[in-house]
Image (cartoon, grey):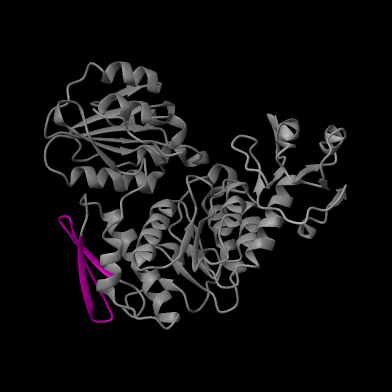
Amino acid sequence: MTATGGRWHGSVPEMVAGIATDSRNFQPGAAFLALRGPSFDGHAFGASVADRAVALIGDSEGVPLWADLDISKLEVKDTLQALGNIAHAWRLRLEKTTVIAITGSFGKTSLRSILEAGFTALGFNIAATRANLNNLIGVPQTLLAVPVEAEIAVIECGISETGEMARLAAMVQPDIAVLTGITGAHAEGLGGLSGVVSEKALLLEHLNENGWCALGGGVSGLLRSNRISAPLNAIDVDQTSESDVVCWQLVGRELLMSWRGQEASLQLALPAAHWASNIAFAASIMLRYLDSTGREAELAKVADAISGWQPPAGRMQQCEGVNGCLVLDDCYNANPTSMQAAINTLRSLDGGRIAVLGDMGELGEDSDAAHGSINLQGVDRIYLIGPRMQALAAIHPEASWFATSDEAIAALANETFDEGDTVLVKASRSMHLESVVQLLCRAEVAHAL
């Protein structure tokens, strides 16, 4: 606990099994760290776990609330900062673990899940981000859960405000930094696209010595236009050489890949170009890692390892809908790039193409233009939900527009969907369109947290 610079009240515990920030499902032997937010104060729950905790960690306002509790207490200036400091101290002990940190405006979770599936299938001991634990609270929790014997740890880093990436990057100190792609997503809190680029790029500044990075489509150009230098040994998917980048072509649902004279293919569940791009990007990262660590780098083995990947909940998951239609549940999140990618996949399918689209959040002053720029050509029926989607509805008078999700559900309950139809449901998480998915699907659908 010396990492926090805090002051102990009482004896110092001999061992701490873990750090918990939630009093629910608290495990004996852990220390309870009380977080503070605009509408909650974790210090109020310290007493409820005191009989099972080895220590309580709080700030100068909260620790006095525990004065009557017979337990060791660590007083720190800021408990959120302390959580990050403790996580960084643990990260420094992961000397045999290659830490891969992923950020970007889209594709983080899909890429993380592909890498996790691929490396696991190759026999590596791997730890990775769970659920949506990718912010200043989730990243330290993820780091603290990485066992010392892990060979690889894949950690998502998500931000929405200036200053967050600097803290996350310093905490994670990656061996491999990945920028999937950058758009105006979260521009509202980061000062426009230029601000998003500058903040995301801070992940590169904390690469370990001999570390390297991987840049998704368009990233290197955005870095250059913002006068940001990338490491010289980067994987850049915009380069034409096959020396590092896996080249790909999608033919129907078959993904054809080539790398250093090797060729391989695999079948996708959907003819989704953004899946193909993510898989090829993941394969590039895996092959570079294998090559750089002296292991055999074979594209066919990597492709076979990735072939068992399934998309995470809420990201183009397929379910059987009413009357035998196909529902594509992509309602976990949305930005202009991922929205267009989902629509492009929809229109590549046969049969009736139906889109149920909700607002994309946190786009700042470019929000109306971003919504209005979505290309709906080839979509047979369109349902738009939310005030921001009015910009797109104004361009498509044939579309049905609803102010709220509840209004849309009431209307969709009376609509007819038939066998052969595909219904895409996509929006930002704040729109809660999983309720639409539940209406349209025959079976219970597991949703992302």
Between 8 and 375, the residue placed more toward the observer is 8
Residue in the image at 45% along x and 65% along y: 125
- Residue 59, horizontal then vertical, whole percent: 81, 42
**Does residue 263 show up magenta in the picture?**
yes
Between 116 and 8, the residue placed more toward the observer is 8
**Does residue 218 show up magenta in the picture?**
no
Q: Is residue 17 above or below residue 67?
A: below
Q: Quadrant of residue 227?
A: bottom right
Does any portion of residue 348 appear in the rendered image?
yes
Q: Main secondary structure of the magenta part?
A: strand
Residue in the image at 36% along x and 59% along y: 117
Between 367 and 430, the residue placed more toward the observer is 430
Q: Which residues are magenta?
A: 247-266
Residue in the image at 37% along x and 37% along y: 331
Q: Is residue 257 above or below residue 333?
A: below
- Residue 369, horizontal then vertical, whole percent: 41, 40
Q: Quadrant of the N terminus?
A: bottom right
The tally of labels here is 0
Residue in the image at 59% along x and 37% along y: 25
Q: Quadrant of residue 400?
A: top left
- Residue 177, horizontal then vertical, whole percent: 51, 66
Q: Quadrant of residue 228?
A: bottom right
- Residue 186 shown left or right of residue 372 in the figure: right
